[in-house]
Image (cartoon, helix red, strand yellow):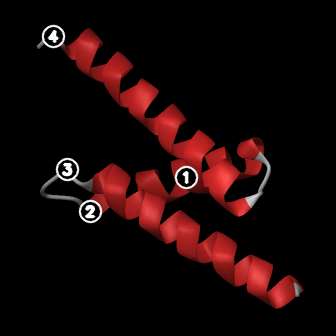
Amino acid sequence: MQAGNRESSASAQHASVVEALARETGAEPSHVQQLYEHELAQLEANAKVRGFLSVLACRHVRMALRETHARSN
């Protein structure tokens, strides 16, 4: 697979994750995207294996959004 195809595939995957998290949590998609991009960048900075970074970023963002929601209730 060429680098351009991998990047567009990854971008589509990230967009799908952001949309799903926004629907699941009721948070604004733009807010979810900011959190996700920040978390993904943090993980990428230290990752030796990159295959599951989107899964980990998704999990971390979901937990952060749940904690925020729990504190506001």
Q: Secondary structure at mark 4?
A: loop
Q: Is residue 68 left or right of residue 40?
A: right
Secondary element at tag 3: loop
Is residue 70 positioned above or below 66 on the image?
A: below
Which disc number belongs to residue 15? none
Residue type at mark 2 is Asn
**Label at residue 46:** 2
How far is the residue under mark 4 from the one under mark 2? 24 Å
Q: Nearer the viewer, mark 1 or mark 2?
A: 1
Q: Nearer the viewer, residue 27 or 49?
A: 27
* Residue beneath disc 3: 50
Which residue position holds label 1? 36
Callout 3 environment at 10 Å: few (<14), some (14 to 19), or many (20+)? few
Give x and y (percent) for residue 16.
50, 35
Residue 2, label in figure: 4
Asked if labels 2 and 4 touch by Cβ distance under 8 angstroms, the answer is no
